[in-house]
Image (cartoon, helix red, strand yellow):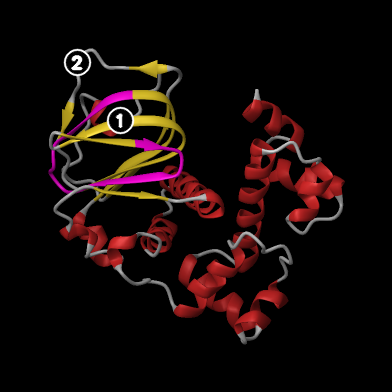
Amino acid sequence: MPNPLPHRHPDADFANVSFFIRRMNTSGFIKPDKVPRAVLPGLCFIYLTGGEILVEVDSRPYLCSAGHLLLIPDRLPFAILHYSDAVGFTGLVSPHLLARSGGGVLSLLMAPHQQAFWFDEAGFVGELFNMLQLSFERGDTSFIEKGGDILLSRIKPLGKSVLPAQVQAFFELVFSPGAIDGSLKFYAGSLGISTNYLSRLVRQTTGRSPGDWIDIARIGRAKELLSGSQDPVIDIAASIGLEDQSYFSRFFRRHTGMTPSEYRKRMQG
């Protein structure tokens, strides 16, 4: 079984770590014989894309399932009581990085914060964590900070978005359930700005182009439909704005490493 949490590494030292993230992937129901407690020097986060995890924070239990984000404040003791096919991401962020990235409010959290993301938003947050983890592996600190800003804008304790209003509006359009047009011209027109200005603003703010985010939204919706329905693949392709089933299959495989049918079989099997 992979070690799913950073504090389960006996030699790990996080005193001087500003950001850490790793994938969590457990199989079956696991209840540790001896529950290791952790007190980490930063804001710890756990986000699940599947399964379940039970966390005890300061003697209070928190049950997390798919789409749930749990934030554990700096130096608050916590332990894992059980895992049940838990898949997702976990890690920590130092208070110094939070202050630099506009998340200073979170560094002042005194109690755990649990938040549920649903449907397309859960898919978006899951893909964002995936990109953060890949960027961490590659040492891409630029995207870690920009991706962190985007994530912070979805967390309720902040009270307001740390993104420019037009970028936030772009995300709301792209990740809304009915968004199927997919063209940059459509989104720029909906926001009343030029395509060049939207491209420049989104890239400067997030480190990725509007087209990248449109693809991420499409993949997230396709994954949800493939795993949660029996709709024909051609109908799913059309629902995300791709009428050509062959192109959709190539598009999906390029982003996931699997064909739509292979992904459905794995998720529903």
Where's the N terminus, which quadrant?
A: top left
Where's the C terminus, which quadrant?
A: top right
Residue 262 coordinates in the image, percent (x, y): 72, 30
Residue 155 appears left or right of 206: left
Q: Nearer the viewer, residue 216 or 180?
A: 180
Label 2 element class: loop
Residue 57 appears left or right of 30: left
Q: Which mark is residue 256?
A: none
Which residues, given as a range, are shown in magenta? 64-82
Which residue is situated farthest in the top direction here? Answer: 33
**Residue 149 visible in the snapshot:** yes
Label 1 element class: strand
The residue under the point 81% across, 40% down is: 232
Q: Which mark is residue 54?
A: 1
Q: Is residue 66 magenta?
A: yes
Q: Amino acid at mark 1?
A: Leu
Which SS type dominates the magenta stretch?
strand
